[in-house]
Image (cartoon, grey):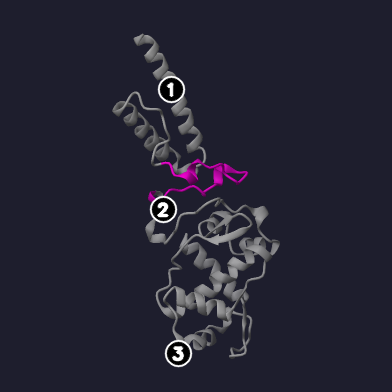
Amino acid sequence: MQHKNEGASVTSLKEEVKEIVEIVALVPEEHRAMCFEMLLKDALSTRHASPKSVPHPAPHASASEARPAKSPTPAINAGDVTDDQISPAAGIQPKVNEGSDIVMADLHMKTKKFMSSNDLNLEHINNVFYKEGDKFELLITDFGATNMTEGQIRIASMQALHHALTDGDFTTTVEAVREECKMRKCYDGPNFSRNFRVNAETFDFGEWSKEVTELRLSEVGKKALAEVVKNLT
């Protein structure tokens, strides 16, 4: 009877290890060794604590890690990083629901050209945005600005990039920038128009006036945006 129990235990352990391997395969390559070790230790400690309990996925494995990856290239899928694997200094928030990595096929041709011209790659983009269904969502919460003026211009630039992921046009609106500045607590009402005027080279509106409602990044603005994205990652 004891030999039977031992055989069943070994079989159960093999199944559990197989399940762990399947979960780890969904995690970015650089985190796989740590994730495997963590899940295996938890599984072994659970077995020692209550041998009769039914094997179950380790609590460290989140629901997002267990879900199938949408990306056809799992090796570059960073969609399932757990909270403790994310650098807090980068101001990153975890992907939710069906979030997955962005692939080149998702991007507009103009956006691909922008990336190529400014030495940006998919890793840079995926460290700032992710894809949820048919939409692109912002992954980071901190744009690295050190003052309100810089914060306003970076918000405008990141909104333009967000828009460009879909249709290739690096555009946003003055009101959209105003609203996000308020949300991020960096709205400087008295200097809001001035900030656009003194940073006019970032945009294609020529000379700033209160009649300007749409913002489009200039080539100078796109280059500056690319450097911001690189620094954020």
Mark nearest the camera among 3 and 1 is 1
| Residues rendered magenta in the picture | 61-84
Instruction: Say few, some or many: other residues with alpha carbon within 10 Å of mark 1 (under 14 / 14 to 19 / 20 or more).
Output: some
Is residue 14 left or right of 226 when viewed as pictured?
left
Residue at 52% from the left image edge and 67% from the top image edge: 227
The residue that mark 3 highlights is: 190
The N terminus: image quadrant: top left
Asked which secondary structure carries label 3, the reply is helix
Q: Residue 194 in magenta?
A: no
Label 3 – label 1 distance at C-alpha: 67 Å
Which label is found at residue 86?
2
Disc 1 residue type (three-letter) = Ser
Of 62 and 72, which appears nearest the observer? Answer: 62
Name the image quarter holding residue 6. Answer: top left
Amino acid on which disc 3 is placed: Pro
Q: Is residue 173 above or below residue 61?
A: below
Q: Earlier in the sequence, mark 2 or mark 1?
A: 1
